[in-house]
Image (tube, coloured by chain):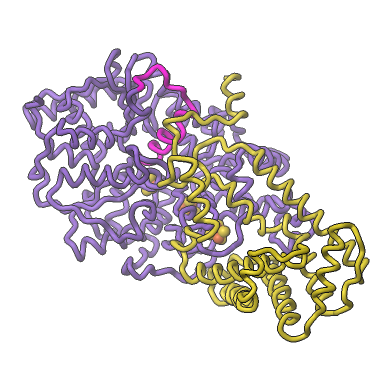
Chain colours: A yellow, B purple
Amino acid sequence: MTIFFAVLFSVSTLVLVAGLGLKIAQYARTPAPLKIPTTPAPLTRPGVALRLGREALLFESLFRGNKPLWLFAMIFHLGLAVVLIRHARYFEAHVGPLVALVQPLAMPAGLAMVAGLALLLARRFLIERVRYVTGPSDLLMLALLLAIGVSGLAMKGMVHTDIVAVKAFFTGLMGFELRPLPADPLLGLHLLLVCGLMIVFPFSKLLHAPGLFFSPTRNQTDTPREMRHLAPWAAKLEEKG
Amino acid sequence: MAAAPFDIPALGDPAEHPVPALKPAAMAESKPYLAAAAHQEPLGFPGELEEGWEKHAIALMGDKLSKFRSLQVFMDICVKCGACTDKCHYFLGTGDPKNMPVARADLFRSVYRRYFTTAGKLTPGLVGARDMTRDVLDEWYNYFHQCSQCRRCSVFCPYGIDTAEISMAARDIMDSIGQGQKYCNEIIGKVHKIGNNLGLPAPALLDTLEGLEEDILDETGVPVKLPIDVAGAEVLLVTPSADFFAEPHVLGLIGYAKVFHAAGVSWTLSTKASEAGNFGMFIGNYEQMQKISMRIREAAQELGVKRIIFGECGHAWRVAYSFLNTLAGPWDFLDPRYPVPQHILEFTSDLIRRKGIKLDKSGNEGMVLTVHDSCNVARGARMGDRPGGQFTIPREVIIASVPKFVDMHPDTICDKTYCCGGGGGLLTDELIELRVKGASPRMEALKDVVDKQGVTHMAAMCAICKAQFTKILPYYDFDREMVVSVHQLVSNAILLGDND
Ligand code: SF4
Ligand code: SF4
Ligand code: SF4
């Protein structure tokens, strides 16, 4: 079990980092030949940073578009954020201040995450329009996240795992040193699912996380008259023509 | 109104945001006429679908993906959350699920996934990936011509996914494999051959302008000129050719002329650039869009003007404001004190503020106005020097010209405005059912202010909006003359004669 997960985690991390890196490089490399911010749009770079910040942290556009969905998405993502921060304790030798800060929120956050996911899943069945645009992969993604959340909560609330050993395993792994992982089936399941998530991340719609920052309708300044905006391929076209 | 061969959507209360139940395939048969070889070939597109078009389409898709970040990113990041599903006027008007923006985009995305993603290559069924087939192409043709590229979906999408970008890409691919749309491509041919979308030759144009000068003189006693091809004028006015042709457009043109006259600014039209519109955007073709834009640069250089001002047209203003500098700049030969290009409403509102022209509201006695924010102006461009000027400036001008102004429901104006239903290259008779149904959200909001606030007229600042409304208003039991040009109101109110 220890060796299996040591290998699996290394591979998953590699896939996640390399896959995301390649995707981000692709987005960064692809030119945006025209100014297409959805207006009204900010006129300055700091303005754009603020717009993106509001989108990433407050889901501003979604709030304008669909209030119940905004609420469900917020519940899930906030829960997830706290849970992720909490998990840092498995990777750092000394628990940082942020991790300590969210300590009392751990359980509510985990529950919020699972509840948010359940609501998101339910609306995929209950709302006709959403059902229409939902594909198998959309359901599987929610199911995967739910299974990760539930197995995690189960370890926290019911079948306790030796988290000191888990921490030893991960900190060891980061220093390329094998330390035994507790042979707990629930932990095994949890870790297996997490590895699955890490592997599919760069190939799935989870790319919305980095993608938002590359979305030209959101990340461009509204300055077409002030500054000439020209993509390299368009400049070449001009030379030819 | 004579009975239409289709149902007219019932109009509800805009405050309740009525959303129809899904009616699968309700608009599956709706499609514009196919371009013939005679419309395709002059633009450099193949005359008909050629052997091996499937492969060619995929290659073109790959090319687009590498040239347009919008397309590449939008293909990957949609989470199918459904926030956009009730935002498109064509879905709200027809109930056809493929008119929900995400479903429309998925027609393209499914092919992208099949050929360009690992998941789609390995497990097509799981991620809804499809081969490029004749059926898929037909679906593309029908539904990417049920999108007016109005960008309303992009306002509400948490990642700003703009289905207009995807429609443009799909249309460009279809043109390039020989499956073009007649309406757009025929018009682009006319721009290249004759100089404007309506195909009005120079002599006809001169005639029209002379006639208008006489009309204004008869009516006001003031010799207001409509100059054309006058070298050395200060301003080149580029306006949609509909302004030379039909009401209410032409009444707006008279308004521009009066404003220039009253302000004492010399101006000219151009036979070469006798069209502000740029259908190159509708077909998503960068080269065409650039070629059409270059006429304006050439006209400005030949006439030696110092400024360029655009008349009232929605998509034209988007191309002008957002793209002209890219496509036909730099504009270093023009007067650097003015933005290039300017909108006629920027020009007029500035004069009103500086008291450079005088308006008398009684010229529009008895009218209660509302305004239709043209989607291309609202979400794809700006006016003035502050974000949102595209909303405040037209309102300032209207309010200065009329006794009473009322806005429609807040969820249907400014950047949440609904398209008129005829934009994006869909203003053609064979799509009348789509156009009437797609106009229903706008009609709903209009009816609301007509019933509750006594609105008598709706101002528009776009040639396509004006033409579309003139045509579809009667289907909703409104008078076709309810739609007016913004500068028509200025024209009625402006005091000519003493410009000191
Ligand atoms: S709102 Fe955006 S992310 Fe959500 S389904 Fe529509 S396009 Fe996809
Ligand atoms: S751009 Fe406008 S017409 Fe096209 S899908 Fe989006 S909302 Fe509908
Ligand atoms: S015609 Fe008017 S409302 Fe319709 S797409 Fe164009 S600008 Fe938008």
Residue B29 seen in the current view: no
Q: Where in the figure is residue B248, as x and y percent of width and height?
A: 24, 41
The quadrant holding residue B120 is bottom right
Task: Give the answer, above or below, for where B161 lies relative to B254.
Answer: below
| Residue at the image position 55 percent from the left and 57 percent from the top | A56
Task: Give the answer, above or below, for where A51 lies relative to A125.
Answer: above
Task: Give the answer, above or below, for where B164 lies relative to A228.
Answer: below
Quadrant of the snapshot with the N terminus of chain A: bottom right
Task: Give the answer, above or below, for where A41 lies relative to B338.
Answer: below
Q: How many marks?
A: 0
Q: Where in the figure is residue B457, as x and y percent of width and height?
A: 20, 52
Q: Where in the figure is residue B233, as x and y percent of width and height?
A: 27, 17
| Residue at the image position 62 percent from the left and 29 percent from the top | A233
Q: Is residue A30 left or right of residue A3?
A: left
Q: Residue A157 in magenta?
A: no
Q: Is residue A61 left or right of residue A109?
A: left
Pick the front one: A60 or A95: A95
Q: What secondary structure prevails in the magenta region?
A: helix
Q: Residue B318 in magenta?
A: yes
Residue numbers of the magenta segment: B313-336
Pick the front one: B299 or B174: B299
Q: Where in the figure is residue A7, as x and y percent of width and height?
A: 89, 61
| Residue at the image position 88 percent from the left and 67 percent from the top | A5
| Residue at the image position 39 percent from the left and 32 percent from the top | B197
Pick the front one: B446 or B480: B446
The quadrant holding residue B241 is top left
Pick the front one: B124 or B154: B154
Residue B105 seen in the current view: yes
Residue extending furthest toward the bottom: A158
Quadrant of the snapshot with the C terminus of chain A: top right
